[in-house]
Image (cartoon, grey):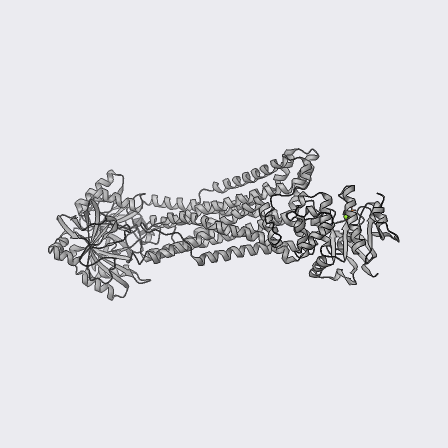
């Protein structure tokens, strides 16, 4: 036994490069797997935890619902287990709170509104008098205010003394802040007023997706909804929204480690079985001399397991300590993250065990197949067979030989090719994501979605909309704008949103629309006229001729020219104003423009509760998505690079140990170094070429999973594809890896001692 | 006849740590053009070491090795490679054929893809039918004759053989040695061969005996026998 140990140690020294590369494989593999996994798990659980403990809403929905309707929806939703809150409030008006001197969110409430509002009172009571306020508990704590204090506030230039009647935890909460609410900077103050003003915004807390939520709300209220995943001020972001960005990152993090682990297992498997085969001769001698099998196996396994264990353990520890820290720091440049508590630490160690098991199994399988042979056949140099392809004597000999080698060292070739393909697959993913999503901006945004930002106000305010349209264009902030009146209606049993547009609006471009007709989505089929029932306190039925259609892009819209309505229903505009439905100005912001500032300006000038909404499919939102994706790409590229480097090292040391004798014979025969290099290089080239081709389907699978995780924009499909240029860049990357691998091998070949290599037993 | 190979004061040491192990301790000898020289001696006396140095595969510690007047120990790696490719042929005890190339292809590898001449060489070695066989399908004797054909395919000025029959039985040894001798007698190839088999002594023009790194004796045989005359 002692001698066998000694042999293991000596083998370790002779195969130092192989050993180092196995150590590195285990180290890098577990480092990445453990570190990334822990990062993902910790991020996700910390964000969920924050989300839960702060009782944050998932969606904000804006809809002009009559109070009775709102109440109905509220009651029905409660029965349905949907948490709905915060109806009828003056949203997005930022007021300077005198005593505190900060801009905070203020919502104004009427007596009715508290019927559909469910703050959890922690201290004090609901407001009973005008200008009493209920304030956010966290905000109160941050700013040191208590029940009974007065908050002097300014509303549109006028100063009011507001008495704090109670502190509460609100279940709604869209906070100002880039991601995680910065409670010191914001807060929700609900002020009880007798004025009936304010838009209808309510918050929904749900796990439903956007489409499902919309359908559910429609079902419950029997009304169509236009909603955005995130509504509110341009910079207001719910944690859920951040979570959706983080989803991208975590979904990535949930795939990446596995790619690392699988390719690692593959390579280790090849390594271990290769090593056992290399040892065939020695095993034969030991068997012939009656050394017990278990001792042989043990001596073979020992260096492997020690390597994998130490490398993996170091990788696990460093991975857990370093990676989450680096990654979370990187992310926090883009988001304000909650403090992250590390979780899922065991995963790294489980992976270590998996790795050791894989190594053991590989060695056992390989050794047991060796044990089935007689010691004599082991000691006789058994030549690999089945490699007689390319009989033609015309084919260049070096090419022929490398192809045959590639095929006769099947296992090594297949496994290393597959693991190279997995790594390259990561690169493909990064390019594919970029190509598919950046294309989205060009193909979808601007074609279907022309506007970034909506300013809406209550038609009851009787504002001259043409004046606002002109003002928006004159400000020079916007590329174009569109005005429309909107009301929910029913058509053919379906809930639809009817938009009434000024047909002269130059920015309104929809295929097939003309001023005499109504534009409906194709999905409603071929109809000649439609009956529309207007939802409001005032019943109105209209029959409109249909002309044209536009592509079904998942909107429930029917578009009607204003002139047609006026001509057919002279009373309509009057009725519409009475019903107090939605009036909207759609805007396309110029790059870098903050439409919210413009909204603030309007608020100041008109004393109207303008509600500004950044579209979830707006170009700005896309821009944010790109930022996340480019971080993702960076991570993918770095990881792919590290993995490829370790693999190249390993594969090259493997091929070298396979071929060292062949290379020495070449040298002894005086065959030029370039030919020997070509021989080893060609084999790598075959491997990488196949890996390159395999990488595309692998990359497509990974990209698909990631895109699914981040598809915030319903109805917009990102068609997975990759551009020729990206494919070329990838090819160059693959070529660089090949060249590095070849340089490594060729350097080692140069240093091979011919005499001693030939002395070795085959 | 001129001198083809001239070895002067050749030494070779192996170092392990600070310990010097001098295995060739100053060896000088000559082999003339067309000569069939044997290098003999006890195991470990340094025969393979000398052959490897002469073959341009190993470095010497000091001394000079002249081939046709130029000292190969002064050669650069590139020149050495050129030397191995064109001037010297080497036959090893363990054949050293490339496993994934057939007999014919092993020869094509070094003769610039000249199929006709490769086939002729195999014919000469009596391996006409074995040209497409792979090394794993060849007997030891056949493999060694393929190796010999491969060494010959570059038409070397000097053929070095390190115990070419060491792994072979009587019949196969005979076939290989007669091929080697006929190369010397018919083609006039200069040969330096290491062997342990004293039966080959009468075949040689010159016998160089080594003893632990020194030349023990050099004997010249004026009337060597042909293989058919050899009683063995
Ligand atoms: N790489 C090496 N390191 C140290 N010593 C070596 C090395 N190679 C050979 N030797 C020593 O050099 C001496 C000569 O070796 P060489 O192989 O030339 O012997 P040989 O005469 O060919 O023997 P044999 O007839 O057994 O083949 C031996 O004593 C051997 O131990
Ligand atoms: Mg020897």
Is residue A317 in view? no
Q: In this rendering, does residue A281 appear at all? A: yes
In percent of width and height, residue B191 lies at 79, 54
> Which quadrant does the C terminus of chain A fall into?
top right
In percent of width and height, residue B74 lies at 74, 62
Residue A39 horizontal/vertical position (percent): 44, 47
Instruction: State the residue lying farthest toward the left.
Output: A571
* A374 left or right, relative to A560: right
Front residue of this view, candidates A201 and B169: B169
Foreground pick, A505 / A252? A505
Residue A655, image x and y in percent?
60, 49
> Where, quadrant-wise, is the N terminus of chain A in this rendering?
top right
Residue at 14%, 51% in the rendered image: A542
Horizontal side of A231 relative to B147 (left or right) equals left
Q: Nearer the viewer, residue B77 or B161?
A: B161
Q: Number of marks in the image?
A: 0
Image position of A756 (left or right of A173): right
């Amino acid at each position: 036994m002692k001698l066998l140990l000694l042999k293991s140690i000596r083998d370790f020294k002779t195969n130092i490069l192989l050993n180092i590369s196995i150590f590195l494989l285990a180290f890098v593999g577990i480092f990445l797997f453990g570190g990334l996994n822990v990062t993902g798990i910790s991020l996700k659980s910390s964000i969920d935890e924050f989300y839960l403990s702060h009782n944050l809403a998932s969606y904000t929905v804006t809809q002009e619902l009559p109070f009775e309707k709102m109440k109905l929806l509220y009651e029905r939703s409660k029965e349905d287990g949907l948490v709905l809150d915060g109806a009828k409030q003056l949203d997005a008006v930022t007021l300077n709170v005198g005593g505190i001197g900060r801009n905070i969110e203020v919502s104004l409430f009427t007596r009715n509104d508290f019927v559909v509002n469910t703050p959890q009172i922690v201290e004090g009571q609901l407001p009973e008098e005008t200008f009493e306020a209920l304030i956010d508990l966290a905000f109160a704590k941050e700013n040191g205010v208590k029940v009974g204090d007065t908050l002097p506030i300014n509303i549109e230039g006028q100063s009011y003394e507001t008495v704090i009647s109670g502190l509460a935890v609100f279940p709604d909460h869209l906070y100002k802040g880039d991601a995680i609410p910065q409670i010191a900077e914001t807060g929700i103050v609900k002020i009880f007023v007798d004025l009936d003003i304010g838009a209808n915004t309510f918050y929904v807390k749900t796990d439903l997706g956007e489409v499902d939520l919309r359908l559910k709300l429609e079902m419950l209220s029997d009304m169509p909804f236009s909603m955005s995943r995130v509504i509110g001020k341009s910079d207001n972001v719910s944690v859920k929204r951040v979570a959706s960005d983080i989803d991208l990152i975590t979904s990535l993090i949930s795939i990446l480690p596995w790619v690392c682990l699988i390719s690692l297992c593959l390579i280790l498997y090849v390594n271990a079985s290769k090593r056992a085969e290399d040892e065939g001769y020695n095993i034969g001698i030991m068997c012939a001399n009656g050394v017990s099998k278990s001792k042989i196996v043990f001596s073979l396994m020992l260096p492997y397991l020690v390597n994998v264990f130490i490398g993996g353990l170091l990788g696990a520890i460093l991975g857990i300590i370093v990676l989450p820290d680096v990654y979370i720091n990187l992310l926090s440049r883009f988001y304000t993250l909650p403090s992250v508590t590390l979780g899922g630490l065991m995963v790294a160690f489980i992976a270590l065990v998996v790795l050791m098991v894989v190594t053991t199994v590989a060695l056992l399988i390989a050794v047991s197949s060796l044990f089935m042979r007689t010691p004599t056949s082991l000691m006789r140099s058994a030549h690999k067979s089945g490699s007689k392809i390319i009989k033609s004597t015309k084919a260049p000999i070096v090419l022929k030989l490398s192809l045959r080698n590639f095929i006769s060292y099947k296992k090594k070739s297949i496994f290393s090719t597959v693991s190279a393909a997995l790594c390259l697959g990561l690169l493909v993913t990064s390019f594919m994501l970029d190509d598919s999503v950046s294309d989205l901006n060009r193909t979808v945004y601007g074609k279907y979605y022309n506007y970034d930002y909506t300013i809406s106000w209550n038609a009851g305010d009787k504002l001259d909309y043409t004046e606002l349209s002109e003002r928006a264009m004159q400000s020079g902030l916007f590329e174009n704008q569109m005005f429309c009146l909107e009301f929910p209606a029913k058509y053919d049993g379906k809930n639809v949103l009817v938009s009434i547009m000024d047909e002269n609006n130059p920015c309104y471009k929809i295929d097939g629309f003309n001023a005499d007709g109504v534009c409906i989505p194709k999905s409603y089929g071929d109809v000649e006229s439609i009956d529309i029932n207007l939802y409001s306190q005032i019943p109105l039925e209209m029959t409109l001729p249909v002309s044209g259609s536009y592509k079904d892009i998942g909107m429930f819209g029917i578009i009607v020219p204003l002139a047609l309505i006026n001509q057919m229903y002279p009373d309509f505009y009057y009725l519409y104003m009475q019903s107090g439905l939605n009036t909207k100005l759609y805007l396309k912001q110029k790059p870098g423009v903050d439409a919210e500032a413009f909204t603030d300006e309007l608020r100041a000038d008109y004393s109207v509760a303008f509600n500004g909404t950044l579209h979830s499919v707006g170009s700005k939102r896309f821009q944010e998505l790109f930022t996340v994706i480019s971080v993702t790409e960076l991570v993918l590229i770095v990881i792919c690079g590290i993995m490829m480097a370790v693999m190249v090292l390993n594969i090259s040391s493997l091929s070298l140990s396979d071929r060292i004798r062949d290379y020495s014979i070449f040298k002894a025969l005086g065959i030029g170094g370039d030919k020997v290099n070509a021989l080893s290089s060609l084999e790598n080239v075959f491997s990488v070429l196949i890996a390159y081709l395999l990488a595309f389907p692998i990359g497509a699978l990974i990209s698909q999973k990631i895109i699914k995780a981040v598809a915030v924009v319903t109805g917009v499909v990102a068609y997975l594809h990759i551009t020729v240029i990206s494919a070329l860049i990838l090819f160059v990357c693959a070529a660089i890896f090949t060249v590095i691998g070849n340089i490594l091998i060729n350097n080692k070949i140069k240093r091979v001692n011919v005499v001693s290599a030939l002395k070795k037993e085959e | 006849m001129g001198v083809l190979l001239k070895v002067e004061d050749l030494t070779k040491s192996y170092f392990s740590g600070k310990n010097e192990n001098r295995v060739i301790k100053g060896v000088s000898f000559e082999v003339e053009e067309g000569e069939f020289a044997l290098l003999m001696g006890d195991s470990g006396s340094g025969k393979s070491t000398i052959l490897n140095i002469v073959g341009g595969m190993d470095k010497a510690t000091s001394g000079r090795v002249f081939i046709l007047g130029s000292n190969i120990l002064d050669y650069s790696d590139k020149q050495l490679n050129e030397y191995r490719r064109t001037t010297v042929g080497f036959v090893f005890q363990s054949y050293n054929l490339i496993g994934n190339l057939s007999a014919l292809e092993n020869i094509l590898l070094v003769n610039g893809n000249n199929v006709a001449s490769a086939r002729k060489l195999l014919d000469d070695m009596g391996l006409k039918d074995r040209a497409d066989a792979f090394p794993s399908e060849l007997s030891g004797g056949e493999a060694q004759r393929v190796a010999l054909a491969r060494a010959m395919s570059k038409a070397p000025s000097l053929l070095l053989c390190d115990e070419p029959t060491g792994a072979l039985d009587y019949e196969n040894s005979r076939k290989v040695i007669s091929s080697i001798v006929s190369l010397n007698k018919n083609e006039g190839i200069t040969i330096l061969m290491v062997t342990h088999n004293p039966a080959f002594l009468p075949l040689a023009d010159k016998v160089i005996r080594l003893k632990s790194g020194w030349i023990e004796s050099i004997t010249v045989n004026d009337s060597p026998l042909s293989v058919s005359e050899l009683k063995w």
